[in-house]
Image (tube, rainbow, N blue to C red):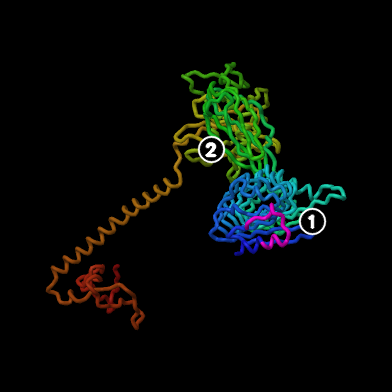
Amino acid sequence: MRVALGMLWLLALGWPPQARGFCPSQCSCSLHIMGDGSKARTVVCNDPDMTLPPASIPPDTSRLRLERTAIRRIPAEAFRPLGRLEQLWLPYNALSELNALMLRGLRRLRELRLPGNRLAAFPWAALRDAPQLRLLDLQANRLPAVPPEAARFLENLTFLDLSSNQLMRLPQELIVSWAHLKTGIFPPSHHPRLVLGLQDNPWACDCQLYDLVHLLDGWAPNLAFIETELRCASPRSLAGVAFSQLELRKCQGPEFHPGVASIRSPLGGTALLRCGATGVPGPEMSWRRANGRPLNGTVHEEVSSDGTSWTLLGLPAVSHLDSGDYICQAKNFLGASETVISLIVTEPQTSTEHSGSPGALWARTGGGGEAAAYNNKLVVRHVPQIPKPSVLATGPSVPSSKEELTLQHFQMDALGELSDRRVGPSEAQVVRSVKVVGDTYHSVSLVWKAPKAKNTTAFNVLYAVFGQHSMRRVIVQPGKTRVTITGLLPKTKYVACVCVQGLVPRKEQCVIFSTNEVVDAENTQQLINVVVISVAVVIALPLTLLVCCGALQRRCRKCFNRDSTEATVTYINLERLGHSEDGLEELSRHSVSEADRLLSARSSVDFQAFGVKGGRRINEYFC
């Protein structure tokens, strides 16, 4: 009946026969007279049981609303017959899938509203079929991101609502196109405007949000936001912070710090390759060999206080197979940069033999390779490599990682030998009284006196395992007369010498020590406990035996004197002393128990043996 009445109404209005269509049974249709006098049809469908768009929609429909239905997907070309459609509203359905051809044939479409659905993806390329589109509403969906290519399909929009989705970032291409509306110069006849809805998204506040934050800063006549107070959701330290309160850094690709291009290391030594790079965000650092062989070492990474990312590749006991190019790569989302460091493994240095002059630097000793540590001159040889890096401390504080790296780098690059120049006796004897003041199983502390040293005088500390030719050098800064050497081997004998930098150490400037004579705090405490217990046992045991023997003796005497009544009832308890009326000191008497009886020093028999001399009692006390 309703369909018949609708047909009669169309005929009465003079609607052309080719435009007359039947309204779907689940929908309602209405006609509107537009401002220009044209007629427009509106179709509204809100059947909760509807699962697909109706197929018999009148072709002259200009407004179609499918809302609060069970429609889950829109098939390809579902609205192709609706060539006059200008507004397509699909709010609050169960939509989770849209076909890329869903807008095919809708050349006059100006509004597309899809709020309140379950869309996790949107076919941005489908917007090419709707060149007149000006409004796109995707509010309250589940979109996790907007791809960069979407920017070229959104150029003609004047309203875009992406609020209440799962967006964490926006592509740079899209932000640039919006920023052009804010800063661009347009002819008087062309005034583009754009209204954006970006609120209620879990924004990740990092450098990639830099341009969006600055886009929100300030007012522009061509760009407006539904809500300008956007807030961060991550990282946790910035959760809930408004964009207007952020201070973000602009993203930057990796840039390497200048460094060495090649490193030489003797055969069997330890090589340390280092490279550093900056970038926003901080780049990820990695190593690989140019020839594709696996790395024969360990990698350590750290970030310095200025934000530089450092990576260190340690190669222990290098061989000729380790020679070659090593590639250090720094990478972040903006790109990757690489630098090449060449490692050259050389033959170890050999000592040269000189005559026995006092100023000779090198000497060769016999005896199967054992070094004569003390002679007219010290036999030493400085080798730049460090088989096991040692950490030095010239003060009470523990060196930082950065200081350790600087020291190792210096020791590896400080190739050179001690000077064999002639020096006077006073200059050579600046250092004296070298002593070991503290040591452990793995470290030793050396002190020395240098009363004639100047404020700019630096010292060298040379040390090695006793009997070895190779010695390691430690440079002590001017003004320091104490150094701690760590990384020593336990139960090992060492020789250490201290001299002015550039001079040869003399015999009196060296000291020999051994790490097997160390007794740490725990062992010392255990030794003290053993000594105390032993002394206590030696002292307390005889006293205990003496007391027991005395008690046993009194017990025996009691048994032999049972016939004496007075002997069984009177005992002396030395608890306190009293004074008699005549000023004489006398002993207070008390009844005592059996325990007191055993601890008394004298029995009553001994007491009866005391006499009275000159009318005065003789007072004697035993305890």
Left or right, 226 with respect to 303, comes to right
Q: Secondary structure at mark 1?
A: loop
Residue 450: x %, y % from top left: 64, 37
Residue 94: x %, y % from top left: 56, 56
Note whether residue 297 is visible: yes
First-in-chain label (2 vs 1): 1
Residue 485: x %, y % from top left: 55, 37
Quick check: 470 above or below 308?
A: above
Q: Answer whether residue 17 is magenta in the image.
A: yes
- Farthest bottom residue? 581
Front residue of this view, candidates 499 and 357: 499
Instruction: Tell me the amino acid under the disc marked 2.
Output: Thr
Front residue of this view, candidates 520 and 86: 86
Note whether residue 382 is visible: no
The residue that label 2 is drawn on is 486
Front residue of this view, candidates 29 and 287: 29
Quick check: 434 above or below 589?
A: above
Write down the region rendered in magenta.
Answer: 8-22
